[in-house]
Image (cartoon, helix red, strand yellow):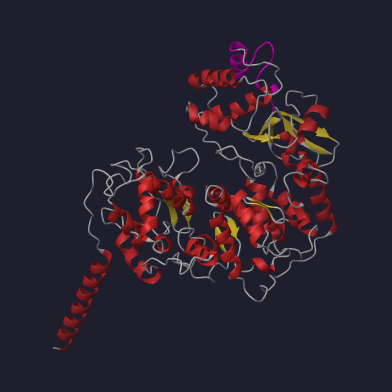
Amino acid sequence: MIELTVNGATHRVDVDPATPLLYVLRNELALNGAKFGCGMGQCGACTVLVDDRPVFSCLYPVSSTAGRRVRTVEGFGTPEKPGPLQQAFIDRQAVQCGYCIAGMIVRAQALLERVAHPTEQQIREHMNPNLCRCGTHMRILDAIRAVAATGELHRAGEKGPAS
Amino acid sequence: MRWRRTGYVAGAVLLAGVIVFAAIAWQPAIPPVKSPDIAITPELVSKGRTVVALGDCAVCHSPEGHPAFSGGLGLRTPFGVIYTTNITPDVETGIGAWSLDAFMRAMRHGVSRDGHLLYPAFPYIHYTKVTDDDLRAAYAYLMTQPAVHAPAPRNDLPLPLRFRPALAVWNLLYLRPGAAPALDASPRERGRYLVEGLGHCSSCHTALGIIGGESGRYLGGGDVDGWHAPALDVLAHAPRPWTVEQLSAYLTTGLASEHGASAGPMRPVTDNLGDVPPEDVHAIATYLMTIQTSQPPTAPKAGAVADASQLARGHALFDGVCATCHGDGGPMETQLGRPPLAASSALQGPTPRNAIMMVLQGIPWPSHPKPTAYMPAFADNLTDDQIADLVVYLRSTTSQPPWPDVRDEVRRARKDLSHD
């Protein structure tokens, strides 16, 4: 049995230690926000946070989570009360098919928690690993900029690891 | 009386020492110029473009996220961090006020236009061998690039090393000024000229001594940015011996079909060499294959054979994390003429360092789109023990003996990375 903490809740799952975290999140815990895109760490659709760092969960063995804090897009808000990035993505209609969006929001969250008001270049470099096949990148960037302007996700006093 | 005489002698020796030191350390400023002081023709600029590419100037002076040639890359040396400077023709923060003489003096002697001595992280001990014609062309090319205002960040060095005149002593030991042109028109001589001079291969591929001078066997292997720069004089003794063709392909495209992809600090070098005339890369490969040792290198100390449970853990991790790309029939095994993973230099090499670094850092996407190898970084995905299990397992899939102390090496590599 493997114990892992996701969005503050502790779970015990009976899987092989090398199973990718993404499979555990989706198949065992029914957290279907993170998506299987390429399975090769090239698209970012499966991005989740582990100890505040964005990782490709399709290439992340579940046994690596021991003692670490996993966060997924489900932990950022609810349909009734979306988190700041979720609300900004809705307001700016940054979603076309939506497949990449959970990964986009999660990766952006990591940056905005660490840097209160990132520059345009910082945002673009940080978001570089995540792809959107529909091509809504401009709206995605716009939504991120809107939250960056408020600085509300920034965790004061936390320097956080470089990404 | 005796004491007084001793005092005079000591004083005289000290004074003489100061005078000699001042004579070798003091360099005059070269007057600024308003514009380049040579006739700049399109042919000269075009030649200079090739010279600058062969000199790998952009590797250090055009780091990711900075405008071309504006510097700002922090070079981690054992002594501290030294930042590369702006070599665009900006008058205030670049080399815009430099005459050809000032440029030549910097390249040949490691002296800035204003007379201060440059740190040998700038490879003037190699550039000194470059011919006047090539330096002139490089000057013409750099002086016609867009000027960028970019002051160099302050170096992070301990106090004694901030006293630049002391570099004069280092120069006495390691700098042999003067051009070393090719002696004839053969590819071998052209290759020697490029390897020793512009290419400054030994800056990374020769081990450095305690004061940062190249003091190991020439091109016998070195360490840079946490990676192992392999020995270039034993390529013929590799499990699959390198050939001129494999080496040329590797240097030009970053991928050798029998040895794998370039990574780490070599990646920008192969990116650069993709842009120079193929005959120059062929010359470099030709020369390197002529300096191979007659005897194979002594085998490094082998580690204990891994226990079955560690191999099983490594195998399981491989299946879960790596196999989508590297498994049988996976894209890395079937596309673009890549070698099987077990044949790659990183897994065949004398130390596990580069295999570990590949797992930790991967190969980033290039800034300029071109056919390339890419691999995600796993530093945040795998624990040290998992990386050790994986690397030990992967080594067991080769014909080589086990590496010793892989677990400790993972910890050391991670520590080297944490200084970034």
Residue situated in front as seen by the camera: B44 or A47: B44
Above/below status of B338 relative to A134: below
Q: Is residue B80 left or right of residue A146?
A: left
Q: Is residue B213 above or below residue B368?
A: below
Query: From what the image shows, is residue B328 above or below residue A140?
Result: below
Residue B172 at what x, y percent from top left?
Answer: 35, 70
Residue sitting at 31 percent across and 59 percent down?
A: B105
Q: What residue sits 38% from the left and 67% below the top? A: B175
Residue B86 appears in the figure: no
Tell me residue B56's x, y (percent).
48, 52
User: What residue lies at 62% left-to-right and 50% top-to-bottom?
Assistant: B254
Q: Residue B95: where, in percent of width, then height?
A: 32, 46
The stretch of residues the image draws in magenta is: A72-92
A114 or B214, nearer to the observer = B214
Residue B32 versus residue A127: which sits nearer the camera?
B32
**Image point 47% across, 28% down: which residue?**
A119
* Total numbered circles: 0
In the picture, measured across the screen, residue B324 lies left or right of residue B99, that is right
The reply to whether the magenta stretch includes residue A78 is yes
